[in-house]
Amino acid sequence: MDWSDMKAQMDLWVFPSGMQRNGGVGKGSTTWTSKYGSVIISIYDSVTSDGVNEAGLAGNMLYLAESDFGNAKNRGKPLISVGAWLQYMLDNYATVAEAVKAMHSDPLTVIPATAPNGAPALAHLSLSDPSGDSAILEFIDGKLNIHHGRQYQVMTNSPVYDQQLAINSYWNLIGGDHFLPGTISAPDRYVRASYALKTSPKFKDKRDAVASIFSQMRWVSTPLGMSDPNKPNIAPTLWRSVTDHESKRYYFDSVINPVVLWVDLDKLDLSQSGKVLTLNLNAPNDAGGEISGKLKPAVPFTFIAP
């Protein structure tokens, strides 16, 4: 996650199944009951920005300046806060294919908001599952665009995904063994991440595989303090996460703490009788490893609203 506010509150949450949810924007908000429990990362205690559910469906949300969710009145569809958009996916679907099928009818209007630091809360999101399937979802000019298929494995920020693919096609022709674009812009980082993913060995040992993915993400992360206040899509990397879909293990690596934490979903009670749990990720933490025993009961946060 790249964001311009280094002090943004970050928390890890455990949400059981059976939770009564709503879109968080008042009249006209969609409502649902969560089918699946999930482990997620929130920012500002108001946005689900990253996470995985008990079925192994994982999602990641990143800033996209070009996002245009459309006019709510003109669309005439149930409303959902941008802060709840990813949570809706994790609550309702077990696979990427299931989520994409449901979203093809464009059933919701996502409502943007302003983050506490004054930046617009605009985003696109990615989905992946244990089968290797993946999808990128963007609202452009008021319409939902979906790129669905296991070939769509990398997502950064601006520009829109069609343009990212075109830029990457150019660099694929050049090849990356001798030269790659090296700035902190999102297109350059997309190209480097695509090259790393394509050329890195495929490790059978899961520990090595996770380490490989973390090393690739660190290679394309933006250092703290490097940002452009006029371009929110160019911002320091605040955290990195890795989902082991098959083992149902969710890893979290904060740039402000020197350790990697993880949660084994099999150690959690994600049934309807389970509790909402949380852990403050901004607090100093020098002990890494599995942290399910450190989670504390809490009241669920309210999704960000305009």
Image (cartoon, grey):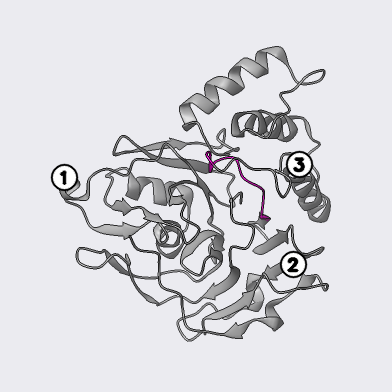
Q: Main secondary structure of the magenta part?
A: loop
Seen from the viewer's position, the closer of residues 246 and 91 is 91
Rendered residue at 26%/58% (across/down): 79
**CA separation in Å, label 3 and label 2:** 18 Å
Q: Along the horizontal axis of the image, is 189 left or right of 84?
A: right
Reading the chain from its start, which is encountered first: label 3 or label 1?
1
Viewer-side label of 2, 1: 1
**x and y percentages locating residue 99 in the rendered image:** 40, 51
Q: Which mark is residue 261?
A: 2
Reading the chain from its start, which is encountered first: label 3 or label 2?
3
CB atoms of marks 3 and 2 within 8 Å? no
Seen from the viewer's position, the closer of residues 139 and 105 is 139
* Magenta stretch, residue numbers: 230-241
Mark 1: give few (<14), some (14-19) or many (20+) Cα within 10 Å: few
**What residue would you read off at disc 1?**
74
**x and y percentages locating residue 240 in the rendered image:** 68, 54
**x and y percentages locating residue 6 in the rendered image:** 64, 58
Q: Quadrant of the C terminus?
A: bottom left
Q: Quadrant of residue 93?
A: bottom left
User: Is residue 280 rendered magenta in the image?
Assistant: no
Mark 2: give few (<14), some (14-19) or many (20+) Cα within 10 Å: many
Rendered residue at 46%/69% (across/down): 36
**CA separation in Å, label 3 and label 1:** 42 Å
Reading the chain from its start, which is encountered first: label 2 or label 1?
1
Residue projecting furthest to the front:
229
Q: Type of residue at label 1? A: Asn
Rendered residue at 83%/72% (across/down): 286
Q: Which mark is residue 216?
A: 3
